[in-house]
């Protein structure tokens, strides 16, 4: 990872683009937001009222392959730019993504605006402890559904940058190993087969008891029995529409982390979002047991107001994502996730008659 000091100097070199004026490295204040596979910093210009920026840095990793790092960074910037331009062209000011501002591919650096507001996941956590009003979270969840509808139904099909062969191969390899990303771009029976096969592999890897694992496989197979006959709905997809990746501000909703955006089944984003609600709302010491169902209806009334979806298919995709919550470990959070996932899956299996 690049040091904060080195990053300050790089950002200062591009001060005119980022801040509209030249700045010194010492005038930039960096705060670490995350350090995982890459470092993410919040960048402020000291003594100014300008909004903060977000700098994402990628390293060449153990391979030391800087050419690959640069190409991957350029691809990510291109995807974010395509999404931003599409939303701008669609004229949806209430539904936003952060504006990409700067690419320094050879240094693995992307800079973009920071999304203003509060992550929806934080608001839901607070509700579970009585610190946020239900009606306020209803508005936030409604905004999440409306953002997704705008992105899928109002924005023209995304025109993504063409990835060089090597990057295309790397992206395909990375996606194939991920239980969410591997579904993007698939449709119909191909998608249904991938869902069942991925679920079976994870159930075996997590050593879920064979009786439950067999029932889940049968439930998914039964639910997708007619998926190849035109039941799928395709459009623009975020890629991993998580309650942690949506920020709710004053009168607007902003989605972040769109590097996996593309074209695929519209069931994917909606189901992943509802799966996330089910998981985070299991922590509700002061909440109503009916609250997850209420939030589900609020979201769907905004995402699919004409009910133009097959609820059986949506439930099957949620079940697929919940399989991931059966993985062992994770101490207390992992234990409660497994309990909640099993309870949800049992109710679902009863509904599909397995």
Image (cartoon, grey):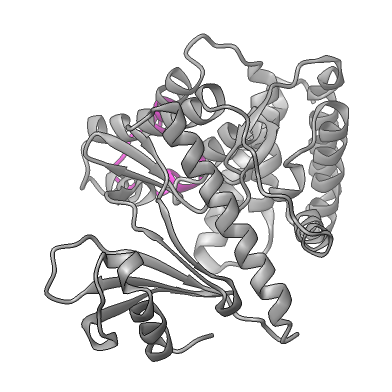
Q: Quadrant of residue 136?
A: top left
User: Residue 103, percent across and down?
Assistant: 51, 66
Which of these two is toward me, 209 or 198? Answer: 198
- Regarding residue 347, the answer to whether it shows in the image is no
User: Residue 254, percent across and down?
Assistant: 38, 43
Please determine whether, in this image, residue 96 is positioned above or below residue 68. above
- Regarding residue 266, the answer to whether it shows in the image is yes
User: Residue 328, percent across and down?
Assistant: 68, 63
- Residue lying at the far top of the rendered structure: 306
- Horizontally, residue 318 falls left or right of residue 104, namely right
Residue at image coords 86%, 21%: 228
- Horizontally, residue 124 falls left or right of residue 230, namely left
Which of these two is toward me, 25 or 180? Answer: 25
Range shown magenta: 277-295
Q: Is residue 32 magenta?
A: no
User: Residue 287, percent across and down?
Assistant: 31, 39
Q: Quadrant of residue 91?
A: top left
Please determine whether, in this image, residue 258 is positioned above or below residue 193. below
Residue at image coords 60%, 77%: 106
- Horizontally, residue 204 falls left or right of residue 40, namely right
Residue at image coords 40%, 23%: 298
Quadrant that contains the C terminus: top right
Which of these two is toward me, 180 or 17? Answer: 17
């Amino acid at each position: 990872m690049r040091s904060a000091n080195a990053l300050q100097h790089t950002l200062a070199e591009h001060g005119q683009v980022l801040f509209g004026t030249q700045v010194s490295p010492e005038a930039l204040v960096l705060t670490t937001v995350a350090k995982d596979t890459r470092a993410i910093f919040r960048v402020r210009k000291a003594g100014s009222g300008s909004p903060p920026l977000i700098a994402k840095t990628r390293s060449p990793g153990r391979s030391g392959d800087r050419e690959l790092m640069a190409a991957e960074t350029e691809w990510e910037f291109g995807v974010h730019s395509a999404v931003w331009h599409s939303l701008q062209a669609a004229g949806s000011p209430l539904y936003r993504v952060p504006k990409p501002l700067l690419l320094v591919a050879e240094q693995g650096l992307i800079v973009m605006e920071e999304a203003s507001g509060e992550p929806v996941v934080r608001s839901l956590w607070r509700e579970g402890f009585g610190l946020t009003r239900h009606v306020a979270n209803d508005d936030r969840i409604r905004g999440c559904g409306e953002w997704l509808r705008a992105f899928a139904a109002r924005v023209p099909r995304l025109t993504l940058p063409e990835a060089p062969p090597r990057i295309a191969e790397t992206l395909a390899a990375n996606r194939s190993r991920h239980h969410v990303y591997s579904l993007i771009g698939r449709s119909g029976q191909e998608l249904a087969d991938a869902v069942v096969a991925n679920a079976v592999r994870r159930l075996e890897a997590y050593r879920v008891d064979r009786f439950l694992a067999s029932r889940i496989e049968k439930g998914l197979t039964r639910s997708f029995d007619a998926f190849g006959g035109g039941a799928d709905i395709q459009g623009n997809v975020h890629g991993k529409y998580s309650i942690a990746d949506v920020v709710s501000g004053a009168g607007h909703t902003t989605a972040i982390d769109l590097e996996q955006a593309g074209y695929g089944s519209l069931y994917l984003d909606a189901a992943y979002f509802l799966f996330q609600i089910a998981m985070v709302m299991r922590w509700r010491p002061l909440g109503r047991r009916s609250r997850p169902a209420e939030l589900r209806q609020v979201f769907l009334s905004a995402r699919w107001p004409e009910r133009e979806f097959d609820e059986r298919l949506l439930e099957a995709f949620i079940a697929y994502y919940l399989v991931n919550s059966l993985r062992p470990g994770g101490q207390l959070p992992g234990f409660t996730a497994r309990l909640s996932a099993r309870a949800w899956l049992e109710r679902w299996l009863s509904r599909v008659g397995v």
